[in-house]
Each structure stands twice: as structure tokens, then as C-alpha cells.
């Protein structure tokens, strides 16, 4: 079994159907994407004990205390830690993944993400916040990073004729995880609520489910042989100065100004969107509390989170594919300009109690948030070449780690500060939205400054040839074997049904709940 994890043993032959790889990637990304739905847990986790901690209880004491409830800002660190370790693990293990292969990384991701949630269930059961941080934040965060980058470079290699579409498919599922996970978690918590809050049982069930699903996805990964290309495909040469014909080594990428400008572009775009996602459920409940019945608002808020997740998915496919025609730079200019307008308008929509407009604004924001993630790998391939794009992408995701702290903490702590100053909870997010809009202005400027990489950072032809020979030696194994085309014809629709049916049901459930919001 362990030998089957090695990269040299998962090289596909010429008969392999490349469309079997996307559903394997989706199984993993739909599982780890549940991190975006974690806001559905916050309200319940602040009411486990039933006694609010006094102002004399310090932050350090609340990490270990069992006699009073945690604050929402304390729980918010779970999400931030997960994103921090996502970026850190992607940066650390990105180059290793290129050598070890996506299957080995996928198995490691399954063990750490699924196992992390199981550990968190123990933390909730014993009311120990540090165990939740360790389980979901640290161990689970490592699983997020490994799972996130495992299919990116693989799918780019399988779909060189559709680079934008490939990056969209690679990480589409990460945006859809909450769309399936949030309503599922809500159902499980209600089912188990007779024995307490129902949260620890929900963590346990989700952890076991995701562990199995991700293992199935990992064993579905295959990599193309060296020099493989789609039958009949002839590369088209585009006259674009930003699309490099050369390659930059991963060890030199961070020495270029382009890397750090792209780092800022990703960080600022993500900070704005992730700040919203981290508080989506409670924010909607507090803004819409005077409109919806108290018994139904929690479920409707879960539908709002799922609607944002649907927007996240659609944005990843739409904007990544559109970037093939618009260009990556122009696509990001649209993100920052339109995003600024949306964030500035959101407090106004909330103040006039126009919930339909309020929800629509954040749906537009989330399409660009997801689109930014899906477009950045292709942007990197354009600027730095494809030789080390997976490893460079892993290092760039440290921008996501930074954004994972900056965005949610800015929203969480500004909310608490404003409420302490007497601001109504429904208006407590306004200042945060204006600050997030300001971040997008700096992102707009950073994107404008991006240009071609200096020739001194390009790999020489000898260096490229040397690495190609090493890859070719590894890729020889397995190429001569013969795939069973008949079995593939059966497996292909089944694989797509496995990921497609839950997605279709989640979309139906999302739209069904969205009718109430837009009524």
C-alpha cells in the first residue's frame, strides 16, 4: 500500500482519461473547504456552559477555563490558526510535493484534517479551547495546506490547453465545502443537541467522514508522463509581455519584486474576503434580527453562508476561465475596483434593512474572492513559467496565512470594540467594511506595478534540461502499462456522481433557503 503512494507508481499511461483526476481533487477540496463554514459553530460554542465569562477573566484563563463560555473572538483564532498553518505548510511542503507526488500529499492531508477535527471534538467535550486550536487550527491547518496544493500543479499539467479552467477546477471544491458542510453541520448539531450543544458529536462525525472521502480522493490521483499533451493540441503562442516563455527557479522567485507584489495582491484580496467569511453567520443574524423570526434566523443564516459558498465556487470557475481572455492582471484590476465599491455599499444596504441587496453585495464579493484564488496559480505560471509553479504557489500562500489573521481579527475585534462603545450589533460591522475597502485600494496599486521578471532570474537552458531529465527518468515507470479503458468508462460517471450529487443537493438546498432572503 505504501508503495502505491510513491509518485513513480502513479504515472498514467497513454490510455488514461484525464477527466478522472478532477473528481478526485474535488473529493479532497470539498472536505477541506468546510473551514469556510466554521462560522456556523461560533454561536453554539459561546453557549456550551450557559454562563458568560466576566470581564475579570483574562484571555489566557479562557483558554483553559471550564466554568464559563468562550467569547466569539476567542473562537475566531481557530479559523485564523487554520489559515496560518495552511499557508505555512503549503510553503514548507510545496517543493516536497512536486517530488513526492499528489497522492502521498493527499493521504497526509486526509489524516491531518480528519484527525484534527476528531481532536477538536475532544476539546469541545472537555471544554478546552487549546485542544480545539491544536486540532482544527494547527493539525487541521497543516491538512488544509497539503490538501489545497496537492491537485493544483497536477491539473495544470493534465490541462495545458485550458490553464485557467484547470486552476478553477483544482480549487473549486474548496469554495464549495461550506455549501455542503454548513447545512450538514447544522443538521447534525440539531440532531445531537439533546445531549448538550451537539457540537462535539458533529466534529467527530465530520472528521470521520472527511477522512474517508479524502483517502478516496487521494488514491484517485494520477500524474501525466513526461512530455504528455492532449491529443491534437498545438500550443498557441500569445504576444503578451506578462506571459513568460522562460522559467524562474523556486529558490529565486522570492528574490524578485514580482513575487512580493503578487504576495500583496493575494494577501489584500484575501484579507477582505476572509474577514467576511469568518463572521458570515453571526453578521447576517445580527443585521437581519429585526426581519426574520428568531426560531428560523439561525437556519437562514446557515443558508446565507452556503449562498456565499456557492458564489465562491462560481467565481472560481467564472473568473479563472475569463482570465484566459481578459488577462490575469486585468482580472485582478476588476477584483479590486468592483470590490471597493461593494464593500463601501454594504453598510448602506444593511442600514436600510434591504437584506436582498445586502446578500447580493456579499455574493458578488465572494465571487471575486474565490476568483482570486483560482486565478493566482495561472498568474504565477505566466510570470514565473511552469517549471516550479506548484512550489512557488505554495510559498505565495503565506500571504493567505497573513490574511487569515488580518481579515478575521480586524472584523472580530472592531466588532467587540464598537459594541463596547454602545454601537448596535447590527451596525458594528460598518467600520470594518470601510477598512477592508481601503485594503483593496493598496491591492489595486500593487497589481498595477507588476511587470515581467528580470532576465537575470531566468533559469538557463542547461538548468531546465537537467530538471527535465530527472523528471523523465521518474516518469518512465508505468508509462508502458495499459489502462483498462472499459473500467474507466464505468468509473468516470460514478466518480463525477460521487462529487456531483452532494454538490447538486447543496445547490438546491442553498437556492431553496435563498428564496427567503430574496423574498
Image (cartoon, rainbow, N blue to C red):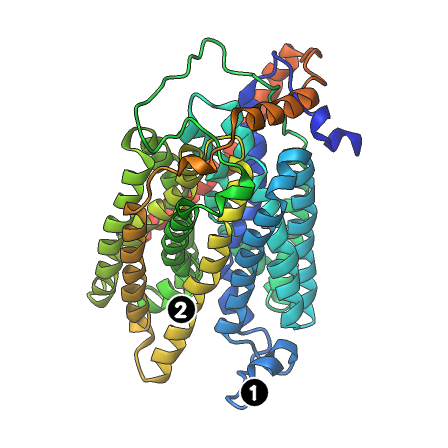
Which mark is drawn over residue 194?
none
Which residue is painted at 40% across and 48% down in the image? 257
Is residue 329 rendered to the left or right of residue 68?
left
Where is 319 relative to 254, above or below?
above
Furthest-front residue in this view: 456
CA separation in Å, label 2 and label 1: 22 Å
Nearest the camera: 223 or 52?
223
Which element is circle 1 on?
Answer: loop
Q: Position of residue 261 (x, y in %)?
A: 38, 49
State whether residue 518 appears in this view.
Answer: no
Look at the image and tell me in which quarter the N terminus lies: top right
Among the two numbered marks 2 and 1 on one chain, the one whose residue lies closer to the N terminus: 1
Where is 13 relative to 34, above or below?
above
Where is 139 relative to 396, above or below?
below
Q: Position of residue 219 (x, y in %)?
A: 68, 31
Q: Position of residue 153 (x, y in %)?
A: 54, 33
Residue 2 in which image quadrant: top right
How many numbered tags mark residues here? 2
Residue named by callout 2:
410
Residue named by callout 1:
57
Amino acid at each position: 500500500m505504501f508503495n502505491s503512494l510513491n509518485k513513480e507508481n502513479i504515472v498514467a499511461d497513454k490510455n488514461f482519461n484525464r477527466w478522472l483526476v478532477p473528481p478526485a481533487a474535488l473529493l479532497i477540496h470539498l472536505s477541506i473547504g468546510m473551514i469556510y463554514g466554521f462560522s456556523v459553530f461560533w454561536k453554539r460554542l459561546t453557549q456550551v456552559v450557559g454562563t458568560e465569562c466576566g470581564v475579570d477573566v483574562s484571555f489566557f484563563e479562557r483558554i483553559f477555563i471550564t466554568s464559563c463560555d468562550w467569547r466569539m473572538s476567542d473562537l475566531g483564532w481557530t479559523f485564523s490558526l487554520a489559515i496560518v498553518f495552511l499557508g505555512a505548510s503549503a510553503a514548507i511542503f510545496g517543493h516536497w510535493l512536486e517530488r513526492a507526488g499528489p497522492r502521498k500529499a493527499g493521504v497526509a492531508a486526509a489524516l491531518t484534517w480528519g484527525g484534527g477535527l476528531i481532536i477538536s471534538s475532544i476539546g469541545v467535550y472537555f471544554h478546552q479551547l487549546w485542544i480545539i486550536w491544536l486540532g482544527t487550527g494547527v493539525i487541521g491547518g497543516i491538512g488544509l495546506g497539503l490538501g489545497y496544493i496537492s491537485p493544483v500543479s497536477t491539473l495544470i499539467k493534465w490541462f495545458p490547453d485550458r490553464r485557467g479552467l484547470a486552476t478553477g477546477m483544482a480549487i473549486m471544491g474548496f469554495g464549495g465545502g461550506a455549501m455542503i458542510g454548513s447545512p450538514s453541520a447544522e443538521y447534525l448539531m440539531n440532531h445531537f443537541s439533546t445531549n448538550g450543544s451537539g457540537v462535539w458529536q458533529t466534529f467527530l462525525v465530520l472528521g470521520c467522514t472527511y477522512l474517508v472521502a479524502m483517502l478516496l480522493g487521494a488514491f484517485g490521483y494520477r500524474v501525466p508522463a513526461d512530455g504528455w499533451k492532449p491529443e491534437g493540441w498545438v500550443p498557441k503562442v500569445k504576444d503578451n509581455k506578462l506571459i513568460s516563455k522562460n522559467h524562474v527557479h523556486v529558490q529565486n522567485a522570492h528574490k524578485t519584486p514580482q513575487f512580493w507584489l503578487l504576495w500583496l495582491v493575494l494577501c489584500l484580496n484575501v484579507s477582505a474576503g476572509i474577514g467576511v467569511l469568518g463572521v458570515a453567520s453571526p453578521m447576517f443574524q445580527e443585521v437581519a434580527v429585526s426581519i426574520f423570526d428568531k426560531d428560523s434566523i439561525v437556519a437562514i443564516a446557515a443558508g446565507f453562508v452556503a449562498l456565499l459558498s456557492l458564489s465562491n465556487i462560481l467565481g472560481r470557475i467564472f473568473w479563472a476561465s475569463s482570465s484566459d481572455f481578459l488577462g490575469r492582471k486585468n482580472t485582478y484590476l476588476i477584483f479590486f475596483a468592483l470590490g471597493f465599491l461593494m464593500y463601501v455599499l454594504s453598510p448602506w444596504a444593511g442600514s436600510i434593512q434591504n437584506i436582498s441587496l445586502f446578500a447580493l453585495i456579499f455574493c458578488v464579493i465572494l465571487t471575486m474572492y474565490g476568483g482570486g484564488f483560482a486565478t493566482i496559480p495561472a498568474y504565477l505560471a505566466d510570470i514565473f513559467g511552469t517549471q516550479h509553479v506548484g512550489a512557488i504557489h505554495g510559498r505565495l500562500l503565506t500571504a493567505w496565512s497573513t490574511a487569515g489573521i488580518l481579515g478575521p481579527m480586524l472584523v472580530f475585534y472592531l466588532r467587540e470594540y464598537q459594541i463596547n462603545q454602545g454601537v448596535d450589533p447590527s451596525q458594528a460591522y460598518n467600520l470594518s467594511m470601510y477598512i477592508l475597502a481601503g485594503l483593496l485600494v493598496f491591492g489595486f496599486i500593487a497589481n498595477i506595478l507588476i511587470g515581467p521578471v528580470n532576465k537575470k532570474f531566468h533559469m538557463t537552458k542547461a538548468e531546465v534540461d537537467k530538471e527535465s531529465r530527472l523528471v523523465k527518468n521518474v516518469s518512465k515507470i508505468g508509462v508502458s502499462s495499459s489502462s483498462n479503458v472499459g473500467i474507466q468508462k464505468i468509473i468516470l460517471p460514478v466518480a463525477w456522481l460521487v462529487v456531483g450529487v452532494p454538490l447538486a443537493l447543496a445547490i438546491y438546498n442553498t437556492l431553496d433557503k435563498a428564496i427567503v432572503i430574496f423574498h
